Amino acid sequence: MPVYRPPRIASSEITPEDVYLNRRRFMQAAAGAAAGSIALGAAGTARAEPLTAKPSAYKVNEPMTPEKIVTSYNNFYEFGTNKADPVNNSAPFKPRPWTVVVDGLVNKPQTFDIDKMIAEFPVEERVYRMRCVEAWSMVIPWDGIPLAALLDKVEPLGSAKYVAFETIVRPEEMPGQTGLFQPMKWPYVEGLRLDEARHPLTLLAVGLYGQTLKNQNGAPIRLVVPWKYGFKGIKSIVRISLTEHQPPNSWNILQPNEYGFYANVNPEVDHPRWSQATERRLGGGGFFGGSAEQRPTLPFNGYAEEVAGLYAGMDLRKNF
Amino acid sequence: MALPKLSPRGRETSIWLLYALGFIPGLWGFYQGATGQIAGDPVRVFEHLLGLWALRFLCLGLAVTPLRDLAGVNLIAWRRALGLLAFWYVLAHFTVYLTLDRGLQFGTILADIAKRPYITLGMAGLLMLVPLAITSNRWSIRRLGSRWNKLHKLVYPILIVSVLHYALSLKSITAEPVFYIVTATVLLGYRLVRTPLMARRRNRRNQTA
């Protein structure tokens, strides 16, 4: 079975340090310009700004899912439960100004402004597989900040064992949060064990395909944990809290026998109602042009080499 | 409410028109999916479209009797077409499941049918529909007599398994499945009260006469 290995990067491909440092200055200038354009009345649009990201070794060597599909086929129930609802209903959502509170069991609780985060933290390009619990998958070039870098800034206490995440509640801009049939309680919440959160693969994405995140993809900042099912990737994050006890996660609250806390991609542990052994890789084109391609699902979504050790000795059937 | 009177020939034409219109959503979906115009997961979208239209035609077919009883609208001439449209959509839905969705991997298909309750229910619905489709012609009605009526009562369990098949296949229950659950409940619930309701109505008519 093929196992994912990060490809070795030629030294020529690594950004020289001075360029890298200049990039920060450039980003600060860009952030200023972005803030200026907001002040001039461009606020509240689903605009995507170009984003400069450092290439990284985490790059899946498989064809990327076309951007149009990544930005038009989404599960983001705050905007509606159909796949096209997020792209159709998210235009009024305002991803700026935006702050993320990081608190809980930390030495230095802080509130981060999104544009300052993008300017001050290393933004890397990561091409990851994304496996939805509904048995479809994509390959997405994310731009993001390793969560570990953010956690280092706030200095977790020794008592911190878990990280809890929370999505914004803004019914006036998110039609899925109003009306008669709301599939779940808001805010959407998710959680990781601290060692999962600190794993180098775990990313706070602020962009994809070299641009800031579009509203339907979880603007302005979302979690990406590529070895877990997509629902762990909580979107439009406003709070990250370090906790001692395992935090709740929305799908587990809704259907505890179907969705666990760990949600590691595992072809051997089926969803109670459907198989997880295979997945459909979405790639554009019609029925006969590759869109129906079934492929075997890999343990930990192909990242077993990097992350299987986190779960040594655990019964993954019980801890699904 | 009365419908405009149609000549036998006009009625025949209108039935064929119903078939023609009825197949449009499926054909259109196939065209769009085959030419890459459905974004995201075209197979899943097309498969669900076929299933949903099957359910819609099933509900429409089962609405004919209550409409005639309660609103005086008699659509009985089109009921067979509605039932057969439902059958063809179910068959197409199943074919897409076998081919485009599961890629004819019969090992996993059989495991699915045996292990996954919503797929088992869907399969049961298809199997029950087959005898109804085969006997949807005048010759069978004449041949089977009162047994034909009895046989076609299978449509009630078919509607139940169809709605369950649909609702259980979803990640969460939203407005759309709730709509079909309520519709099916009303359509089937009406059958429970129909006999006493009709008897009372006959009595009243006899008394006034």
Image (spheres, coloured by chain):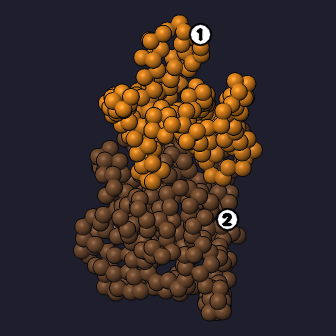
Chain colours: A brown, B orange
Q: Say which chain tag 1 marks.
A: B
Residue A293 screen position, x and y as percent: 63, 40
Q: Say which chain tag 2 marks.
A: A
The dot on residue A10 is 2
**Disc 2 marks which amino acid?**
Ala
Q: Can residue A81 be seen in this snapshot?
A: yes
* Relative depth, front residue between A242 and A75: A75
Q: Can residue B16 be seen in this snapshot?
A: no
Q: Residue at x 54, y 79 (%)?
A: A95
* Relative depth, front residue between A280 and A26: A280
**Disc 1 marks which amino acid?**
Trp
Residue B138 screen position, x and y as percent: 59, 14
Q: Nearer the viewer, mark 1 or mark 2?
A: 1
The dot on residue B3 is none
Q: What SS does tag 1 mark?
A: helix
Q: What SS does tag 2 mark?
A: loop
Q: Is residue B25 above or below residue B154?
A: below
The residue singled out by tag 1 in the image is: B139
**Residue farthest toward the right in the current orientation of the protein:** B35
* Relative depth, front residue between B28 and A91: B28
Q: Residue at x 60, y 72 (%)?
A: A91
Viewed as shown, does residue A55 lie left or right of B195? right
Q: Residue at x 34, y 75 (%)?
A: A241
Residues packed near mark 1 inside 10 Å, few (<14), some (14 to 19) or many (20 plus) = few
Q: Is residue A155 above or below residue B190?
A: below
Rendered image quadrant of residue B187: top left
